Image (cartoon, helix red, strand yellow):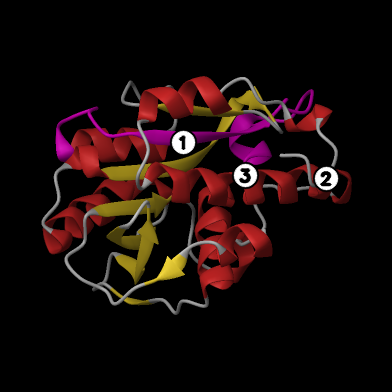
Amino acid sequence: MTSFFSKIKRQSAGDITKAIMGLGNPGTMYANNRHNFGFMVIDHIAEARQLRFRSGGKSYLWCEDSVSQNGDSIAICLSKPLTYMNKSGVAAGQLLRNCNLPPEKMLVIYDDIDLPLGRIRLRKDGSAGGHNGIKSITDYLQTQNFPRLRLGIGPQDDGVPAEDFVLDDFTKSERNIVDKVLDLGAKIVMEYLSSDLDSMMNKYNTIDLREIKTGDA
């Protein structure tokens, strides 16, 4: 990942053109939960870019960056709600107001129990699909028209309720694939800033990181 990010030059920050929000629950007790996969991607990018989060009020943390891609300077905002998953819409609404952006300019990253770990799905819009964080955002914004990156965390363990499974930490045996997903998620976010979403969907939605050796993604 170091070589990938070294190709992306930082510029002076300007008006925010796109926002990236990773979903999860705040607090160290949730940090490694499957439900915090969205947070993990945001943290992964911020660490690689040496960014520091600051308060966006009571509802979210955020950091601003500006990158140069294809000769253009693109100002972005990375954010993590402080509202807990079920009230993510409050944070999303406040973020969009503060950045003066419409919903379609906000990419939301979150876990998906219906996808196996190692698979991702980019979508332009759509229903919540049973995810409480996305439901909160669609209810609060009164629209489904925002892009999202779904990160598989399945399959669900036999006999374990979904609400317990998502709040369990990733296991040691899963960490290798988790790390691959974090690298790929960060790459997708940076490519999303200047690429067509349709072409990205065709490129990434068929990838299965369970079948890819480290360094090949």
Q: Residue furthest front?
A: 71
- Per the image, the residue denoted by label 1 is 149
Three-letter code, disc 2 = Thr
Residue 8, x across and y down, in percent: 48, 62
Residue 2, x across and y down, in percent: 67, 65
Horizontally, is 70 left or right of 16 in the view?
A: right
Q: Nearer the N terminus, badge 1 or badge 2? A: 1
Name which residue lies at 64% across and 50% down.
182
Q: Which quarter shows the C terminus?
A: top right
Q: Nearer the N terminus, badge 3 or badge 2? A: 3
- Let me know if residue 146 is in the magenta part: yes
Three-letter code, disc 1 = Leu
- Mark 1–mark 2 contact, CB under 8 Å? no
Q: Nearer the N terminus, badge 3 or badge 1? A: 1
- The crowding category of the residue bearing disc 3, from other C-alpha atoms within 10 Å (few below 14, some 14 to 19, many at least 20), is some
- Per the image, the residue denoted by label 2 is 214
Q: Nearer the viewer, mark 1 or mark 2?
A: 2
- Per the image, the residue denoted by label 3 is 184
Picture quadrant where residue 56 is located: bottom left
